[in-house]
Amino acid sequence: MSQPPQQGGPGEPEGFGAPFEPQPGVYGAPVAPSPQPGPYGQSPQPQPQPQPGPYGQPSRPPYGYPQPPTVLYGHPGSPPSSPPEGPGGGRSRGRVAALVAAVLAGVLVIGTGVWFAVGGDDADDGKPVAKESGAPKKPGPEVTPAAGADELNKGRKDGEAKVRWVEKNGVDLPQGGARVRGPWFTGDIVAKAMYRTASGHSAEDGTRKWSLRLPADVCAAPTLPSPDGKVVLGLRSDTSDGAPCDRLQMIDLTTGKAGWTATVERTGMQDGLSHIVMAINGDVVTVGRTTLTDAYRISDGEHLWGTLPGTCQPYGLTSGDIALAAVDCRKRPSDDDVGDEEVRRIDPATGRTAWTYKVKKGWKVDRFYSVDPPVVSLRQGELNEKWAIALLNPDGTYRAQPVPGKEDFEVQCGEPGENLDDCVGAAADSDTLYLATKPAAGADGELTNSVVAFDLSTGKAKWKVPAPPAQTLHPLRVENGQVLLYLTPPPVKAGNGGGIMALGPQGGALRPVLRHPASAASAVTGLFDPTIRFVDGRSLISSGYITAETDEEEMDLRTMIAFGD
């Protein structure tokens, strides 16, 4: 039985952290919440609900993957146009001029300033088609994942984990490059999708297990796959410019076999399908947009529900064991003003509401940093310049709000309009919220930051732990009473490669969990818009966007690096 709506917290939320400033460009990829089996990026099987990282800032920087009470994942950095600044950083990779030109020439601006690049192929618009290849265009022997790892392991020190395998791009992409969706883990497979191809690799040694050619560009994907290893991708209806993102394609990530397809039906002129928000909860995939959400059963493609009774409609859900929905209650979807919004926990199979939290009027749901417990990022203003975080009880009632003090915080998420559970930089358990501060120049002039722990019941800060000089820390999830964090490598030649660290409930000294080798630091910082996954003692860093100055460089780019003993 649903509970009556709970009113927002006391008073108007105060701006929290750095103001959100949408950035132009194509748009990076995000990562997300809900557990799933696999060697890295997800917690083993029954993971806790998805949970996004830190706060809703558009450029995403790296990493976490979901796990118990706190799920993580994330994408660091933003699309190409400027080098990502958060965890994992990454130097600006060429084709910037070409990318900007392509974006300006063939892009659609939707909603709150999200840019969507539209692609085509030689058959219909004269643009280049992506071609797969086992090696770069320049003559030379093919480099296997293991051989690529051997190169980065040279000079590895005692106590550092080894690079297990390295994947190179090997795909000739259209001008401007392409966004990467995933990675998703299931059993011993790591899968991803890019442009018009989905592929699966061995989580053990990186060898390609399968590759599936798609009929049009991938335009959306859930943060997590289903518990039995399936994913549903959003595809453009065709390869023409401006084609709607209205085609669904189910794929079995274990075998690479394509399953059912479906077309999301437009319900009216206001039903925008230029972009969609996707989530997976058990055997259900949901497709959200401005006016409504449609749900389909993953096992057979059956449409389960669409427009719900009343004027309030969900426009995006979180993936994982718990489905939290952002709900818009505007009477007219075309209204420019922000109407009443709500957070609801719903049954993804029926659309029925379990509880409702009413957001203060004028504020809108930005992201979900955690689903269990619920931690919600809220925004206000035309440019989302005001920011607040609501800490809720498991039943959706208001609990508290973090008290930032003089600290400036930063959570890195995907572009506006993308999945709501794709952040990195925040993690929570039943009584504590961990947030990363915004990187700032330290005594040596290099960027560094800290992690602050907040009491969920009072919102007050408990402690603060700084990152080592010239490095930044990013909370991933809470596990066994300690928060796991990704530590970026310092500038090249600084002597260590960062890795996975841990802090106990009382803070204290950082404890190394998995040290990445310093010999691989430059390779890691070279990954654009990186996504971090860590589980079962292994980590995986994957590029979220692929682009380079030349086709040869693009083909030879490293795209995934796996670490572990």
Image: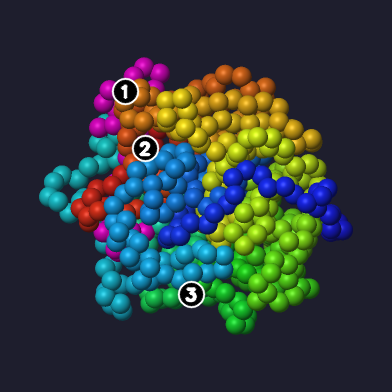
Secondary structure of residue under mark 3: loop
Q: Nearer the viewer, residue 488 or 212?
A: 488
Q: Residues within 10 Å of mark 1 (few under 14, many from 20)?
A: some
Q: In the image, which residues are magenta?
A: 151-178
* Label drawn at residue 524: 2
Secondary element type, mark 2: helix
Q: Nearer the viewer, mark 2 or mark 1?
A: 2
Q: What amino acid type should be assigned to the residue bearing mark 2?
A: Val
* Residue at the far top in the pictured view: 158
Label 1 sits on a secondary structure element that is: loop
CB under 8 Å between callouts 1 and 3?
no
Q: Residue at x 42, y 60 (%)?
A: 26
Q: Is residue 422 left or right of residue 150?
A: right
513 left or right of 202 in image: right
Spot occupied by residue 125 in the image (x, y as percentages of width and height): 30, 77
Residue type pointed to by label 1: Arg
Residue 517 visible to the viewer: no
Q: Quadrant of the C terminus?
A: top left
- Compared to 280, does 309 lie above or below? below
Residue at image mark 3:
244
The answer to whether residue 362 is above or below residue 201 is below
Counting residues from the N terminus, which is met first, the one under dot 1 or under dot 3? 1
Q: Residue at x 60, y 77 (%)?
A: 271
Disc 2 packing (10 Å; few <14; some 14–19; many ≥20): many
Quadrant in which the N terminus appears: bottom right
Residue 70 sits in which quadrant? Answer: top right
Q: Which residue is mark 1?
A: 156
Could you say where residue 407 lies in the image, as x and y percent from the top left? 63, 35
The residues tagged by marks 2 and 1 sit, at their Cα atoms, a distance apart of 15 Å
Instruction: Name which residue type carries label 3.
Output: Pro
Q: Position of residue 292 (x, y in %)?
A: 66, 71
From mark 2 to mark 3, how far is it between C-alphas? 35 Å
